Structure formats: C-alpha cells, structure tokens
C-alpha cells in the first residue's frame, strides 16, 4: 500500500529525514516511536504534502501512485489521512460545513452519490456519538475553542467519515486521559480491517496496550534505526531510547 | 482637473419644500467655503477624490420606469427572505411606490420629507442636521445644499416595532454620469425599539452614479435601534456618505456595515454617546477587489460617563484593491468609566492588495478601560493545508477561509435572515475571485 524508499526531506533548509525506508502492507498497523526531534511528525507532514517540507531525495508510492507528485488534496482523495497533532482552529467555518465539503469531495472522487444534507447530518451525528462528542460541536467553528481532547476526537471523527485507506495518527494519544485514550483506541480498532492500514506516531507505549501493532519502528535522526514487533515497544518503555541511539552510531 | 466644488453647486435642485431652505442655505455656504481634500488633509490622506472629479457626475438623477427589465431583475434580488420587512424602494433617488411593499406599521411613522404633515415637519426640523456636522464633514454640507427630500422615520415613546423597515436605494445607469442625494432621519423617542436596514444596490458593473448619502440616527433615552447599512453597489457606483448617530442616556445602538466594491467609496460612521450608560455595537465588513477603493472612517465620541462601545471591523482586500480603515475613539474629560474596544482585522489575498489601517484612541479621562488593535494578515497557510489534507481543493479551501473570516461577524447578526441573504452573495464573490486568480495564473 505504502512504500517509502530512501526518503530525505528538509524543513527550512534543515535535513530532518535522512534516508527513511518503510513498507506498509494492506491491513497492517505500524507504530512509529522515537525521541523528540527524530522526525516522526515530519514524516506525517511530508507524506501529506505540507508546504515547506521539501523532499530532496527518495520516492514514495501509495496505492500504486507516485505520492510525491500529488497535491495535498489529491493525496487525501487517494485515501491518505493525517490526524493532526495540532489541529487548526478555523473560526467562522462550521465543523458541519467543513465535514460535508470534505465528505462530498471524497464521495464524488469515489464515484458515489453525494449525500443530501439530512442524510449527512444523520451520519455525522452517529459518528459524533461514536467518538463521544456532543452534537453541538458540529455547529461550532472547526476546532474553535475545543479542548485538546476534543480536537483529537474531532480528528478521529473526520477519519471515520472519510474512511481512508491509510490513517496516520500523529500523537493522537498525547494529552488524552485514560478514558479518552481508550475511546480513541476503540475508534481506531473499529476501523481496522484487512484493507485499511494505520501508522501510529507516538511517544508512549500505553497507546499500544489498546491498539496492537503489527510492527514497531524506532525513528532516530531521520531514519528507522530499529524495527520489531510489539515487544520492541515494551523494551523501549523499559530502557528509553538512549541504548538504540548509541547502537545506531 | 475640474472644480467639483463649483460644479456641485450648479446641481442644487430647483424645487424643494420651503421649510428646508434654511438647511440648504447653510449647506451651500459651508460647501462653498470648503476646498477639495488633498494628500495633506489628514482625514483624506489615503483616499483621493480623483474618480469623483474626473467622472463628471454632472447630470441630475432622473425618474426611471419601474417596469424596465433592469428594475424587474433588481426587484427579486433585493428582497430579503425571512426578514418580513416593510420595503421602501428608491430608484436613482426617486421613491418608487411600484417597487415598494409591505404593510404600514402603525407603531412606526415613515414619511417622505416632501409629504410630511405639519407636526412631522416640526419634528424633522428640530432634528435634521443636528447630528451630522456639516462643517466637519464637507459632503454632509453638500448633502444639505442638495436637500429637497428624504425619508423620515419616527418611533414614538415606548413603542416597540417588530417589523423591520428595509429602505433600498437602487441605482441604474443613466445616459450621462449623474449625481444623487440620499437622506434618512431616524428619530427614536425614549424607550422605543426598531430595526432599520439601509440597503444600496445597483444592477450592473457599468454604473455612472455618484451617491451622496447621509443618515442621521437620534436615539432618546433608553431607545434601541438595530441598524444596518449594506453597500452592495457594483464597481462604478461612487458613494460618499455617512451615518451619524446620537445616543442619549442608556440608549443602545447596534449598527452593522457592509461595503462591497466600488472605485470609490467613503463612509464616515460617527456615534456620539451623549447620555450616561449609552452603548454601541458597531461592526463592519469591507471587501474591495479589482481596483476598488473602500474607506471607512469611524469615530465614537464618548462625551458622558459610563458609556460602552464595542467595535469590530474586518476587511478582505483582493487583487489591486485598496482599503482604508480609520477607527477613532475619543474619550472626553467627563467620560469616566468608559469601556471601549476597537478591533480591526484585515486579510490581504493578493500581493498587490493594500490596506491602511489606523485605530486611534484619544483619551482625556483617567478612569476608563479602552483597548484597540489592528492586524493585517494573509490566508493562513497551515489552515489551508489542513483543509486540503481533507481532500478539499485549494481554491475551495481559500473560499472557505475567506468566508470564515467574515462569517464570525455575519453569524452574529441580530437578524439571522440577513446573514442568510448575505452569505451566498459574499460566497459568490469569493468563488468568482478564485476563478479569476486561477485564470490569471
């Protein structure tokens, strides 16, 4: 589904990703861990095409397409979704209008009929319930005045409505209390199937208690320095990242 | 260059009610002794009147046939669904009974100056020209000198009028460029309540009109007025004018302004708090594009103590357009315990767009709470990226962000039906803009 080869990327002239390789098959869940500044979030933004995140070498294939040649909106339509670590507040644009615009576009792209307002509203309300957000959040400005946890749940809601092939969750667990964490985890688990894949970017092993990854990778200085199964996460929890970095050098 | 001062004097209408002659004479002499502003005139520093001088708006407005196709089309456009207002329509300055509609509301007197009875004339005379200062605002002097008619709105003591009054001034092109005058006087007696929507519209871009508009709002003690002034005129409709309000004790004015493009538009909004405890919410949006120029000068005079003002103006300036915003809050020595806040935010959507914004606080009392601020920014790249990352096309995302920027004000309008009316109009404007930018690229 996603194949990253020797990816190099710079942000403001500084090289953050330095030869990253990663292959993700359909239906797999990969966790990416690593210390601050190792390039975890950068990877998410590079994949979704954020301005200023410049790819200097390497290639990325997603769903058989050259991902890097696509505009951010085309990448989304192809089935890539990034749950932002810091979702943007957009006052004046209602969450409902935002969601409907996004879902309409996605449905058109997939050759499905666009839902009328009433049916969409119904669907949006159901998803609201699944992520335990009050329906009032649909009327409010996008993320406007949402708490950290509410923003994360709003991200999850968007993912549920857009039904991507690959969901990248950038520290979706940060700042969540244990109840919210379980809720987010069960939301993600409910979306898991043999075709849909996930990349979980996280600092903490505890998310992986709830979402069992197929693979765990450790990012260090812009490359994957170690890959393993879920036991690697436990090992990291125990030892920290220091031992890996010294090993990588 | 032509001498607009002298030319304008040639256009004084021949006929007018006698009782207006004093007012006209004063206007005449004030205008005659004024001179056209230059770059050195502080109040006109960023707004040149070249378009007015070169446009030779020398013809008088003519009465139009209400059944003309242009007016039939406009008739549908101006109707605000859900507002359930009484509509009073003027075409090129002339009252059009054919286009007007709605029930006469018993609680609100609405009459043309030319048709006012003796008692009404008395009330008009005691208020007209007492709020708008002709010596300070030269175009008010011109309006006075051209005065031959106007709209008088009167709400008697403690009357609460629920049906809004929707006054519409339409302009359609004439053979030669022409000038017209608009005048409104609203007198709200103590404890009264009403809503007045002033709405300016034109039928196509190829306008050749210059409108000189003056509205005066008089709010007696504890009166409440919800006021809108919507400028939806197109490209070549010049407009210079203003809204001047005086608030007595505990009066409340909620005034919303919208300015769409025109090659020259200058509006002075002046509110005087002359009674303790008066409050004013003043909000506005300006959206110049192409080579348009919109200038809002607001001035709040806090004369008495315990008055409050909340003012928010937002502008989106596109293409080669230019906006000027000057927001002055003047706290007089006696105005202790004033609470005043002024915010101005601007969004530039092109490299060639320009805005000159200046919030001005002038404080002569020591126990007041005042805040002001102005910002100029471009569309937020991160927000654009966020929307695009959900599959929304960049152009569409730009429209959403622009709309969102002003929706914060539109969504808070006291009459949601007005918001519903304006949203598609403004949305269409942004969509158009994006298509044009795309083409240009």
Image (cartoon, rainbow, N blue to C red):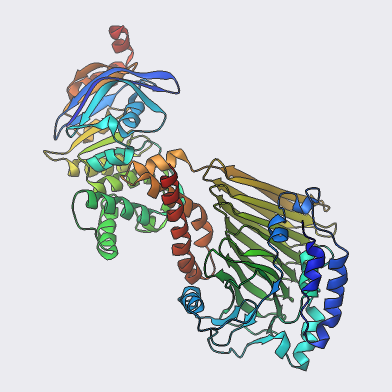
Q: Which of B199 and A118 is in front in this view?
A: B199
Residue A125 drawn at (x, y percent): 29, 58
Residue visible at 32% across and 43% down?
Answer: A180
Residue A101 drawn at (x, y percent): 33, 53
Left or right? Give the position of B98 relative to A181. right
**Count of marks overlaid on the render:** 0
On screen, residue A83 above or below A213: below
Residue B438 drawn at (x, y percent): 41, 46
Which residue sits furthest left? A194
Q: Which image quarter holds the C terminus of chain A?
A: top left
Q: Which image quarter holds the N terminus of chain A?
A: top left
On screen, residue A237 above or below A44: above
Q: Which of B197 and B291 is in front in this view?
A: B291
Q: Quadrant of residue A244?
A: top left
Residue visible at 30% across and 54% down?
Answer: A128
Residue A164 drawn at (x, y percent): 22, 42
Q: Quadrant of residue A32?
A: top left
Q: Can residue B133 be seen in this view?
A: no
Left or right? Give the position of B358 relative to A133. right
Q: Is residue A100 visible?
A: yes
Q: In which quarter of the image is residue A234?
A: top left
Residue visible at 67% across and 69% down?
Answer: B211
Which residue sits furthest bottom? B118
On screen, residue B114 above or below A232: below
């Amino acid at each position: 589904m996603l194949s990253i080869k020797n990816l190099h990327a710079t942000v403001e002239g500084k090289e953050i990703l330095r030869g990253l390789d990663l292959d993700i098959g359909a239906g797999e869940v990969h966790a990416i861990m690593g210390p601050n500044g190792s390039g975890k979030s950068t990877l998410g933004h590079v994949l979704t095409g954020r301005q200023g995140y410049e790819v200097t070498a390497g290639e990325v294939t997603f769903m058989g397409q050259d991902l890097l040649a696509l505009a951010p909106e085309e990448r989304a339509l192809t089935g890539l979704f990034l749950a932002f670590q810091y979702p943007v507040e957009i006052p004046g644009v209602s969450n409902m209008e935002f969601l409907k615009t996004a879902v309409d576009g996605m449905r058109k792209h997939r050759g499905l009929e666009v839902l009328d307002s009433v049916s969409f509203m119904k669907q949006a309300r159901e998803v609201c319930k699944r992520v335990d957000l009050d329906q009032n959040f649909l009327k409010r400005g996008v993320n406007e005045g949402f708490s950290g946890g509410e923003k994360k749940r709003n991200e999850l809601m968007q993912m549920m409505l857009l039904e991507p092939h690959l969901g990248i969750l950038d520290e979706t667990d940060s700042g969540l209390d244990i109840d919210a964490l379980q809720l987010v985890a069960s939301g993600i688990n409910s979306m898991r199937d043999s075709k849909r894949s996930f990349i979980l970017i996280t600092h903490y092993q505890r998310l992986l208690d709830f979402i069992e990854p197929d693979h765990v990778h450790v990012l260090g200085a812009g490359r994957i320095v170690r890959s393993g199964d879920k036991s690697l996460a436990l090992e990291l929890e125990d030892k920290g990242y220091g031992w890996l970095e010294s090993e990588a050098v | 260059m032509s001498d607009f001062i002298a030319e304008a004097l040639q256009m004084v209408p021949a006929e007018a009610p006698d009782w207006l002659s004093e007012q006209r004479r004063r206007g005449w002499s004030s205008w005659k002794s004024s001179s056209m502003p230059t770059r050195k005139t502080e109040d006109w520093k960023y707004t040149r009147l070249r378009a007015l001088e070169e446009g030779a708006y020398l013809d008088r407005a003519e009465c139009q046939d209400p059944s003309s196709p242009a007016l039939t089309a406009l008739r549908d456009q101006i109707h605000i669904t859900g507002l359930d207002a009484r509509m009073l329509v003027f075409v090129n300055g002339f009252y059009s009974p054919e286009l007007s509609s709605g029930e006469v509301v018993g609680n609100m007197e609405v009459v043309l100056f030319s048709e006012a009875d003796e008692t009404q004339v008395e009330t008009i005379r005691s208020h007209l020209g007492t709020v708008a200062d002709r010596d300070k605002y030269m175009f008010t002097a011109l309006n006075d000198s051209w005065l031959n008619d106007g709209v008088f709105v009167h709400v008697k003591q403690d009357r609460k009028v629920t049906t809004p009054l929707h006054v519409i001034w339409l302009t359609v092109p004439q053979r030669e460029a022409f000038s017209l005058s608009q005048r409104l006087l609203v007198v709200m007696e103590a404890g009264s309540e009403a809503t007045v929507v002033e709405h300016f519209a034109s039928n196509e871009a190829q306008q050749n009109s210059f409108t000189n508009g003056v509205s005066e709002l008089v709010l007696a003690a504890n009166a409440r007025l919800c006021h809108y002034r919507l400028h939806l005129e197109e490209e070549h409709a010049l407009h210079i004018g203003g809204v001047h309000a005086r608030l007595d004790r505990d009066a409340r004015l909620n005034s919303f302004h919208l300015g769409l493009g025109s090659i020259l538009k200058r509006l002075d909004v002046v509110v005087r708090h002359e009674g303790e405890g008066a409050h004013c919410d003043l909000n506005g949006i300006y959206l110049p594009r192409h080579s348009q120029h919109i200038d809002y000068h607001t001035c709040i005079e806090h004369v008495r103590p315990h008055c409050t003002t909340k003012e928010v103006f937002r502008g989106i300036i596109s293409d080669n357009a230019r906006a000027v915003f000057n927001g002055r809050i003047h706290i007089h020595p006696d105005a202790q315990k004033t609470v005043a806040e002024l915010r101005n935010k601007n969004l530039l959507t092109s490299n060639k767009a320009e805005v000159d914004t200046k919030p001005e606080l002038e404080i002569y009392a020591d126990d007041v709470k005042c805040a002001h601020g102005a910002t100029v920014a471009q569309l937020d790249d991160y927000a654009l990226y966020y929307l695009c990352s959900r599959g929304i096309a960049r152009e569409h995302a730009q429209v959403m962000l622009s709309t969102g920027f002003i929706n914060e004000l539109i969504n808070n309008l006291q009459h949601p039906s007005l918001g519903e009316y304006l949203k598609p109009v403004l949305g269409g404007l942004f969509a158009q803009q994006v298509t044009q930018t795309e083409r240009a690229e």
